[in-house]
Amino acid sequence: MTAPAPSEKALVPFVSVENMMRLVHHIGIERVLTELTDVIEADFRRWELFDKTPRVASHSREGVIELMPTSDGEIYSFKYVNGHPKNMAEGLQTVTAFGLLADVSTGYPVLLTEMTLLTALRTAATSAMAARHLAPKGATTMAMIGNGAQAEFQALAMKAVLGITHVRLFDIDPKATEKTRRNLEGSGLTVMACETSQAAIEGAQIITTCTADKQYATILTDNMVGAGVHINAIGGDCPGKTELHRDILSRAETFVEYPPQTRIEGEIQQMAPDYPVTELWQVVTGQAAGRRDEKQITLFDSVGFAIEDFSALRYVRDRVRGTAFFQSVDLIADPDDPRDLFGMLQRAKD
């Protein structure tokens, strides 16, 4: 007996890595980053509508595996993501991810997609969105400390959204810096490889730190950071993982996504529980001040939050609709009679 063909309800759009790459090249990476920035900001403006919870994390000596769920009451999303710093030495990605959107009213999935590439894109777009509100106006130069898998996305987002023209690179591994410099050739950015983090931040109005070592670390010390800069601290966040000396936090005005998560995983885990922070959505909606003057040091202590993934998934769902950049996957059992799941199984016998 031939198994019945899956119904339309059983089929879920799936965006593979190959199709995600095709989609990005079809649209153009800088346009994707700009559009994603705007979609994320739009969801930050309705932040209060979302379910919010710290990510569900399973920690091990080797790394962490996390689930990141949220919903706006109509659409539910989650992302599966890992963070394993040791992977790079084994020729593996430090971070991998996939995600799903579902219809709240039925519980049926409506999108399944790779999110390793998409997470890099949404992280860069979130950084650019924060910098749009917090960085000095007219900023032209950014320093990129840590030149791993995120570096090029971060640089191109700052170019596309803020108009950055110069990028100064540093990584403890010169091969990573050379990789980033090479990948940014032809991007329109002036790229300089630097031999120290101190050299990299000279003249930069925006400093982005993106390192992955799972340990307390001091990538920037207090004496390195002058007045008036904006810092995006986006490295591999988890308990015990920091990048900035606590004295920098004492001088800076710190902005976060979701305090209960950031106080566990972010730079502010070094500080007292009452260390003051401002939630970024309040700046976006005008309920709180962002950058107030040219001497202020602003810090976006970014750990990544589920609402940003929700925005990215929604963006991909809308962008692939009516295109060839997805496959239909027979993911949901959908018997003719909802009560007869066993009967559907029996009818599929050879």
Image (cartoon, rainbow, N blue to C red):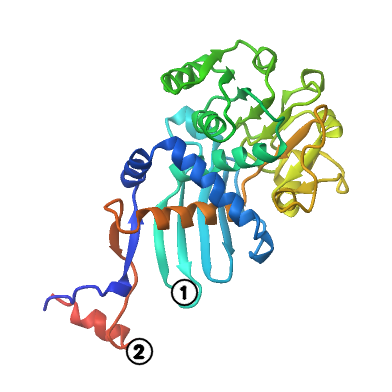
Q: Which amino acid, mark 1?
A: Gly
How dense is the environment of label 2, judged by Cα within 10 Å: few (below 14), some, or many (20 and up)?
few
Query: Viewed as shown, does residue 125 lie left or right of 286?
Result: left
Residue 339, numbered circle: 2
User: What residue is rendered at 75% in x and 54% in y?
Assistant: 260
Of labels 1 and 2, earlier in sequence is 1
**Residue 107: which disc?**
1
Residue at 65 percent across and 66 percent down: it is 49
**Looking at the image, is 28 positioned above or below residue 346?**
above
| Residue 40 seen in render | yes
Provide residue 11's location: percent of width, then percent of height.
30, 68
Residue 56 in view (yes/no): no
Tell me: residue 329, above or below residue 197.
below
What label does residue 230 carry, if any? none
Q: Position of residue 221 (x, y in %)?
A: 78, 22
Viewer-nearest residue: 100 or 81 = 100
